[in-house]
Amino acid sequence: MTDTAPAPGGFRKLSRLGLAIAVTGALIQLVLAVYYLAMAHSPSPHDLPVGVVGSAEQQAQAKQLEKDGQFKVESYDDAEALQQAIRERDAYGGVAFQGSTPTLYVASAASPSVANLFRAQYTKVYQQQVQEQVQALTTAGKPVPVTTLAALTTPPPVTDVVPLPEDDSAGSSLGFVIQALCLGGSIASLALGRLRGLVDRSALRGLGHAALLVLYAVASAGVALLAMALFGVGDGADHVTLFLGLALISLAVTASTAAVVALVGPAGSLIGGLYFTVGLIISGSSIAPEMLPKAGHTVGQLLPPGAGATVARDAMYFPDAATGGAFAVLFVYAGLGLAVILFCNAAANRTRFTRVLNREPAVTE
């Protein structure tokens, strides 16, 4: 009878490999956990733009919000100018001290969490001021008007300039769409990379690879729009801008990933995984960029998921906003990625052709 038991050396090698995999997995989990918690465990404002309409004294009081670096206060001439700034995403909200009662303006479509933060803080300050008025009148022995007493239990007026639609009341749809595009793009990059290995590198193969990436980006954007339409998300959007933005997100992810693979080999496919694991949390699709640490805010908007989230949100809810910077980021990733793919394939074709020309002729007898 033949003994098929593995040699002791095989067990040791297997044990070392298993231990290395376990340790590596644990370290990756630790790094990601620390990163996620550092970015999003307790979102807080960092230079969050807000507006104020009022007298010089009221504007000066509002400017005090800038002391701790949480808010960036801008003054506006009237409530209409403040609302337009919110539509252009120059401000997340603000207060207009016009008339007997100030009004808070928010935009839940920009960030539900920021809108809720404004409501909570504004209501707290508003009721605090009313309580001070009641206490001052009581101390002076004067009667307290019924309207003042009612203000203690009545929420202050709040206007949602750009509200979320009923079909997306939580504002989470954008994050899901960006997540699907990044994951789909990463998988597509790997699949298309396997196909490209069936033929030798050449200028023609480079053109074919680039064409496939563009075709996939168009199909990806179309599928994303179809999925959104099924659930009533983005019905009032600028669909041309939204389609172009979604296609560019997909192309930026797939082309840049394919470019890194062309330069460094199969290990370059990890860049797609980084977009999904690292880029999404700081993309601003689920957490407003200004609610992230400053480094996360800056880096996030320079990656395809972050720039894509800005383009998609503006197309869906803020047509007056300027999206040139976000589009530029996506074009850079997509354009450079395609250029690298074409160059690497063309260079390989020239190298192979030169070797054929320099090959020594066969010796004939």
Image (tube, helix red, strand yellow):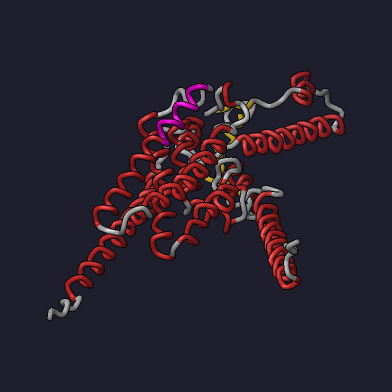
Residue drawn where x is 55% and y is 51% of the image: 279
Compared with 260, 42 (above or below) is: above
* Residue 320 at least partly seen: no
In the picture, residue 98 is in which quadrant?
A: top right
Residue 323 position, x and y percent, is 40, 42
Bounds of the magenta span?
Answer: 220-230
| Magenta span contains residue 227 | yes
Residue 43 at x, y percent in the picture = 67, 47
Tell me residue 110's x, y (percent): 54, 36
Q: Is residue 38 magenta?
A: no
> In the depicted view, which residue is nearer to us: 194 or 130?
194
Quarter of the image with the N terminus in it: bottom right
- Residue toward you, 270 or 352: 352
| Residue 204 shows in this picture | yes
Q: In percent of the image, x 41 and y 52: which residue is there?
A: 193
* Residue sitting farthest toward the top: 146
Main SS, magenta region, reads helix
Image side of residue 180 versus residue 353, left or right: right
Left or right placement of residue 309 versus residue 145 in this view: left
Q: Position of residue 129 (x, y in %)?
A: 75, 35
